[in-house]
Image: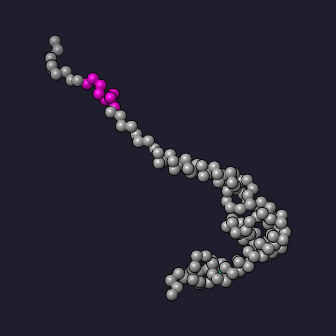
Amino acid sequence: MNANLRNCPQCGRLFAYSGRNLCQRCLRAEEDEYMVVRRYVRDHPGASIFEVSDETGVEEEKILQFLRDGRLEARGLKQLLECERCGKKISAGTYCEDCLKAMDAELRSVVRGSKKREPEPEEPAPRTREKMYIRSDNKPQL
Ligand SMILES: [Zn+2]
Ligand SMILES: [Zn+2]
């Protein structure tokens, strides 16, 4: 029973979805590419992504995706990714360590702030109690 049939975005084939959004065939192809890239990077530390792409025939975009996914560590590669926050060169992921730390701290402070928000002090508002007494003696003015 395959309730989860989808079209592979890569080749258009119908396949049973199993967590990865690619059909078996494309998944295996990607796996192969990954292995090739990984091997090349291991054997050629310091290679640029262009070189790797050139030598392995794997699209740069794919290689970048491996890096972003954290599957491929760019230890061998030059630092090719840029932190989305500050633009610093990083070797994996989306943000540099500094930004991760900063964002973590920000997040914490936001969470703390909203948790500990002090309730508005309920003032009795004494100013509305100004002297507003009405003259009870409606003396007609002379
Ligand atoms: Zn496919
Ligand atoms: Zn950064």
Above or below for 23 versus 130: below
Magenta region, residue range: 125-132
Judged left or right of residue 1, residue 29 is: right
Above or below for 3 versus 50: below
Which residue does the image show at 71% across and 66% down from the upper left? 67
Which residue does the image show at 73% across and 68% down from the upper left? 72
Q: Nearer the viewer, residue 108 or 123?
A: 108
Which residue does the image show at 34% across and 32% down from the upper left? 125
Q: Position of residue 36 (x, y in %)?
A: 78, 76
Q: Position of residue 53 (x, y in %)?
A: 80, 71
Taking the magenta stretch, the answer to whether it contains residue 130 is yes
Judged left or right of residue 102, residue 117 is: left
Q: Nearer the viewer, residue 124 or 26?
A: 124
Which residue does the image show at 84% across and 71% down from the upper left? 43
The quadrant of the image that shows the C terminus is top left
Q: Position of residue 78 (x, y in %)?
A: 80, 61
